[in-house]
Amino acid sequence: MSFVMYGPHLLHSVPYPSIVADADTVYITIAALHMQPLSCGTVMLKSADPNDYPICDPQFFSTDTDRYIMRAAIRNDFRLIATAPLFDAIGDDIAPVGYETLTELSGDEEIDARIREYANMISHPMRTCALGSVIDV
């Protein structure tokens, strides 16, 4: 599950565009990230043409361990949200159209369905440089 904080002034491309029914409401969400997945994807050539993009299948959450870790992270998010004063400020999960609202007690199948539909990859590219040679303080 990938979560983003958004509201009328912050609206941008989010994983749940179908749930934003009221543009005047501010929504807050919490991220559950799996930083060291065991699942291995594949990259294959589409054709002999070097201009064709390859076929990439990341096979996210294809291992039982990865699914277990993600479900545990999501359940921990719900336990955190259920504590005061967060629950008074945040409230319940808002389910995308066609999905049940999730809670800490949701079954594995319900959480797995949401993960399959909305999980995504993030990238945070960065570089290093020697302090003092880049910034003159």
Image: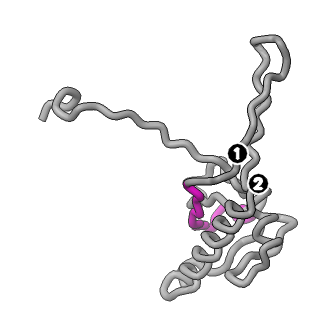
Quarter occupied by residue 71? bottom right
Q: Please state the extent of the stretch shown in magenta in the rendering.
A: 20-35
Which residue is depicted at the point 33% across and 34% down? Answer: 128
Q: Is residue 59 left or right of residue 81?
A: right
Residue marked by disc 2: 62
* Front residue of this view, candidates 79 and 81: 79
Q: Is residue 55 left or right of residue 126?
A: right
Q: Earlier in the sequence, mark 1 or mark 2?
A: 1
Q: Is residue 76 shown in magenta?
A: no
User: Residue 40 bears which disc, if any?
Assistant: 1
* Front residue of this view, candidates 36 and 137: 36
Above or below for 53 versus 31: above
Q: Is residue 26 shown in magenta?
A: yes
Find out whether the residues at labels 1 and 2 contact each other: C-beta distance under 8 Å. yes
* Amino acid under disc 2: Ser
* Front residue of this view, candidates 96 and 134: 134
Secondary structure, mark 1, is loop
Quarter occupied by residue 70? bottom right
Which residue is depicted at the point 67% across and 79% down? Answer: 92
* Amino acid under disc 1: Cys
Secondary structure, mark 2, is loop
Q: Residue 48, position in %: x, y? A: 83, 12
Which quadrant holds the C terminus?
top left
Magenta: main secondary structure equals loop
Q: Residue 75, position in %: x, y? A: 64, 76
Q: Residue 53, position in %: x, y? A: 76, 22
